[in-house]
Image (tube, rainbow, N blue to C red):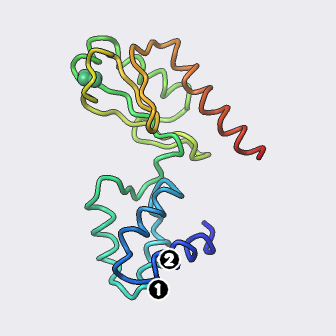
């Protein structure tokens, strides 16, 4: 965790208590979660109770106290997707990534979670990776999906 990055975010929002939510949003975006030591740092720097920072961090669904991964994967297990074999797809992601649902890969590239109905049942089974939506996913497509994001990470690491 780069202190300079956190300090930069604090300055960008005027180092004022009123900017706390915006700072938390930027930190969530940067690290995919709100690390405890960062919440402590914000609390000290802005002179707000740590309990206030925690209550915001747990109140809003967009925030997470655990790393979500740069590419958060959600596998829909709603009824339509379940009927079309979503459980097997979720299991395939777990095997390929070497993690269980609710966990994040050690390199923080991927997080895996299950969700209930993404509202596009006609495309069942459905998976989202960040903002990208994949419909009619098959077990064999899982490899391709993961590969696409691994490639992005490799390209990113080279730049
Ligand atoms: S049940 Fe999966 S999108 Fe509706």
User: Along the line of sight, which residue is nearer the eye, 24 or 100?
Assistant: 24
Residue 45 circle label: 1
Residue drawn at (45%, 59%) of the image: 28
> Is 159 placed left or right of 96 in the picture?
right
Give the percent coordinates (x, y) of residue 112. 44, 36
Q: How many angstroms separate mark 2 from mark 1 (CA)?
A: 9 Å
Of circles 2 and 1, the one toward us is: 2
User: Along the line of sight, which residue is nearer the eye, 105 or 116?
Assistant: 116
Do residues under tags 2 and 1 come within 8 Å of each other at their CB atoms? yes
Question: Does label 2 or label 1 sit earlier along the sequence?
Answer: 2
User: Along the line of sight, which residue is nearer the eye, 11 or 49?
Assistant: 11
Say what secondary structure mark 2 lies in.
helix
Residue drawn at (29%, 18%) of the image: 81
Check disc 2 and report the residue beneath it: 10
Specify few, some or many for label 1: CA neighbours under 10 Å numbering under 14, 14-19, or 20 or more: some
Specify few, some or many for label 2: CA neighbours under 10 Å numbering under 14, 14-19, or 20 or more: many
Give the percent coordinates (x, y) of residue 155. 72, 38
Q: Quadrant of residue 158?
A: top right
132 relative to 19, above or below? above
Say what secondary structure mark 1 lies in.
helix
Q: Quadrant of residue 16?
A: bottom left
Residue drawn at (37%, 28%) of the image: 75
Q: Residue furthest bottom?
A: 47
Residue drawn at (71%, 38%) of the image: 154
């Amino acid at each position: 965790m780069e202190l300079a990055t956190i300090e930069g975010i604090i300055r960008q929002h005027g180092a004022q208590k009123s900017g706390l939510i915006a700072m938390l949003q930027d930190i969530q975006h940067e690290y995919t979660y709100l690390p405890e030591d960062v919440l402590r740092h914000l609390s000290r720097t802005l002179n707000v109770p740590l309990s206030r920072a925690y209550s915001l961090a747990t109140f809003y669904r967009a925030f997470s106290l655990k790393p979500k991964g740069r590419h958060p994967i959600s596998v829909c297990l709603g009824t339509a997707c379940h009927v079309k074999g979503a459980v097997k797809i979720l299991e395939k992601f777990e095997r390929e990534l070497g993690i269980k649902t609710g966990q994040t890969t050690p390199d923080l590239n991927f997080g895996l979670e299950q969700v209930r109905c993404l509202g596009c049942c006609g495309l069942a089974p459905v998976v989202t990776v960040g903002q990208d939506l994949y419909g009619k996913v098959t077990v064999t497509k899982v490899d391709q999906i993961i590969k696409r994001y691994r490639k992005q990470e490799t390209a990113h690491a080279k730049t």
